[in-house]
Image (cartoon, rainbow, N blue to C red):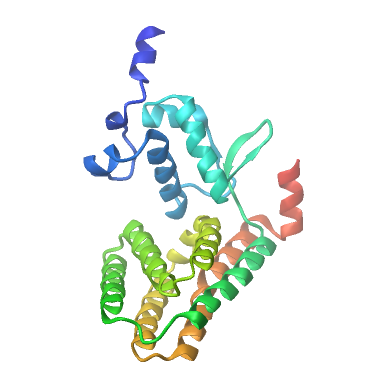
Amino acid sequence: MAVRSAKREPVTRNLRPRTPRTAASVRKQSVSDVIARSLEEDIVLGRRHPREHLVEQDLCERFNTHRGDVRLALFELEKKGIIRRIPNRGAIVRDLTPKEVREIYAVREELEVMAMRILPFPVAKSDLDKLAELQRKHSAAIDAGDLLTVFYSNLHFHQMLFGLCSNTCLIEAIELLAQKTYGIRSFANAFPEALDQARRDHIEMIEALRASRRDDLIALARRHLKPSQEAYIRAYERRFGDSNQAVMILAK
């Protein structure tokens, strides 16, 4: 038993997450942070599916650590709304019902449109250049089929975009709701046409910002949210049927 405990000593440099990491990036993070980020990426990329169990012992073995680190990571993901804990069943990847998705996206739309309404014009050239660079990275990742970089470059593009409104409270609210929908991103990303539409939307957003066309920017913000929402709801209803039935099953 003593030998086994030594092997499980929570040393960050010994972590072996499945997704690639640089040595420097791992050293800067705690063990639980690395676990949480790796699981978040698994969920975003569709490697882990809605209602899939996250077994603590399996995660301890995968990351060569102990249950304390795993539980801290699961706690962080639960706070973000990405997983949920069910009494006597443990942690599972959270699945959102169609009703929940529609409610979240309705609020996201209003918040993101608000950000576009209060965003000051003209936008600085340096900010436009940064957005353009993020868009190029996102576009290149789509062409390369690198869905992890697609996710992060898209995330950074929107953080930069909404950050232009300079309202900290609004930016935090937008980020919080975006996190709750991380688990449904893979459904739209499975379709090349959805990725191509996202790429075109980003280009048009930059052009609207450059020309100070607020109405176009607001219309794009509304349109941009629809593919992920619609793809997830279609997939959910094919797999689980109507949402009322699914909720009853989960409650058992």
Q: Is residue 126 left or right of residue 189?
A: left
Give the vertical position of 222 relative to 249 (above or below): below
Q: Which residue corresponds to the image point at 50% horizontal and 76% vertical from the top-left?
A: 115
Residue found at the far top of this picture: 2
Q: Is residue 82 visible?
A: no
Q: Position of residue 206 (x, y in %)?
A: 35, 82
Image point (29%, 65%), residue name: 141
Indicate the quadrant containing the N terminus: top left, top right, bottom left or bottom right: top left
Q: Note whether residue 35 is visible.
A: yes
Q: Nearer the viewer, residue 210 or 97?
A: 210
In which quadrant of the rendered image does the C terminus lie?
A: top right
Q: Is residue 14 left or right of residue 185?
A: left
**Image quadrant assignment for residue 89:** top right
> What x and y, as percent, mark residue 46?
46, 53
Mark count:
0
When the figure is inspected, residue 204 is found, relative to residue 56, above or below; the finding is: below
Q: Is residue 169 above or below residue 200?
A: above
**Image check: 200 left or right of 143?**
right
Q: Quadrant of residue 192?
A: bottom left
Residue 211 image point, x, y percent? 36, 91
Could you say where residue 237 lies in the image, as x and y percent from the top left? 65, 62
Q: Quadrant of residue 9?
A: top left
170 horizontally vs 152: left or right: right
